């Protein structure tokens, strides 16, 4: 499997092909994701919750993220891997942001880093980009700063919230972000942000009209018991029959296990991720039951505000060209 590059992802956006992204935090899950043909792996700070048992992502340290990222790189040597910058690793200064981003690249072999926030994070994004490191933005619901907007709340459900996220997306793009992740946002406002940006806009709980999808591995496999987001789908029940057929066709299961070790959870996870990849590529996921609803009158107001935004942008462009 050949590792995809940023050039590949930009071409996929231009062709309307969906990018598939999943989290992994260890060697075996990374192996399963790569075997399933995933485009990208995020070593998310969500690993602090699903892997390390923290109640939130806030306690996660850089050293913990580097350890998790090293394991994932070993498990998926031919996959584009993104290291998630934890809280406290990029806010203090642009220099500190670059130093920690370099750790992901040099110590863990990551291809890019991700950080949360819009305008407040542009200094870090610009500095990391200037250092020659690919950096991905994260807007919408940003878990590291949920206290600032009252907890885990859906974003983009008002004209004000939509325009703030649209403005932040454009700022991040101008400051060098190579992609942006939108989290927990209704489909229509998310699609407008994807339309307005030249870089790929990926979604986690942002509908299917963006340029690709991210899911948490432990949600997809039902491997986390504390809670499951509205937009998360467990694929294990959907691939159980395929797993049984696969085993039945292999004959001697003891021999299968000795030769390949693909007779248990690893193969089941691979099948589940493969199903997810196929559904994203075919436009089947996320379906409406995994998409946040929005009132029709609010959606119409957002559409009207976006049309005004486009008209203003066109006018500015024409003025510059004169």
Image (cartoon, helix red, strand yellow):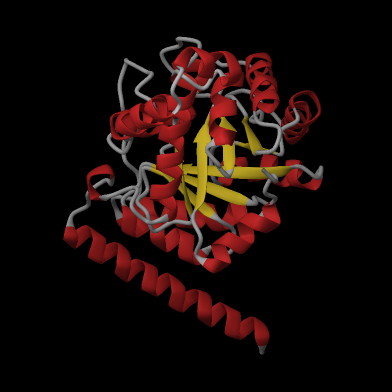
Q: Residue at x 49, y 14 (%)?
A: 51
Q: Residue at x 51, y 20 (%)?
A: 47
The outermost residue toward the top is 53
Percent of width and height locating residue 162: 38, 54
**Residue 26 shows in this picture:** no
Q: Residue at x 45, y 74 (%)?
A: 310
Instruction: Name above or below for residue 168 compared with residue 1.
Output: below
Q: Is residue 36 left or right of residue 234?
A: right
Q: Is residue 110 left or right of residue 224?
A: right
Q: Is residue 129 left or right of residue 275?
A: right
| Quadrant in the picture for residue 227 | top left
| Quadrant in the picture for residue 114 | top right
Q: Nearer the viewer, residue 18 or 270?
A: 270
Percent of width and height locating residue 215: 43, 36
Q: Nearer the viewer, residue 50 or 283?
A: 283
Percent of width and height locating residue 144: 49, 27
Q: Is residue 197 left or right of residue 55?
A: right
**Residue 80 shows in this picture:** yes
């Amino acid at each position: 499997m050949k590792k995809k590059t940023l050039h590949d992802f930009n071409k996929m956006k231009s062709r309307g092909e969906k990018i598939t992204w999943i989290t992994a935090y260890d060697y075996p899950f990374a192996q399963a994701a790569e075997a399933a043909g995933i485009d990208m792996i995020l070593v998310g700070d969500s690993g602090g919750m699903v892997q390390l048992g923290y109640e939130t992502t806030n306690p996660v340290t850089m050293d913990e993220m580097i350890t998790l990222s090293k394991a994932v790189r070993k498990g998926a040597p031919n996959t584009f891997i993104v290291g998630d910058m934890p809280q406290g690793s990029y806010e203090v200064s642009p220099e500190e942001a670059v130093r920690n981003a370099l750790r992901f690249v040099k110590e863990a072999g990551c291809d890019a880093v991700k950080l949360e926030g819009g305008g407040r994070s542009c200094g870090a994004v610009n500095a990391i980009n200037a250092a020659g490191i690919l950096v991905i933005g994260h807007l919408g619901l940003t878990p590291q700063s949920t206290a600032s907007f009252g907890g885990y709340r859906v974003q983009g459900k008002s004209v004000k919230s939509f325009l703030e996220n649209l403005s932040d997306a454009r700022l991040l793009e101008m400051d060098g972000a190579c992609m942006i992740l939108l989290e927990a946002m209704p489909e229509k406002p998310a699609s407008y942000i994807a339309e307005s940006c030249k870089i790929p806009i990926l979604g986690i709980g942002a509908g299917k009209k963006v340029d690709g999808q991210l899911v948490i591995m432990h949600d997809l496999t039902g491997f986390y018991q504390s809670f499951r987001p509205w937009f998360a789908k467990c694929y294990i029940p959907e691939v159980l029959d395929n797993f049984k057929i696969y085993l039945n066709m292999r004959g001697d299961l003891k021999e299968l296990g000795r030769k390949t070790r693909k007779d248990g959870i690893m193969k089941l996870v691979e099948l589940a991720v493969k199903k997810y990849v196929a559904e994203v590529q075919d436009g089947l996921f996320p379906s409406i039951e995994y998409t946040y609803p929005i009132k029709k009158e609010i959606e119409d107001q957002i559409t009207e505000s976006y049309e005004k935004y486009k008209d203003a942008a066109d006018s500015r462009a024409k003025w510059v060209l004169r």
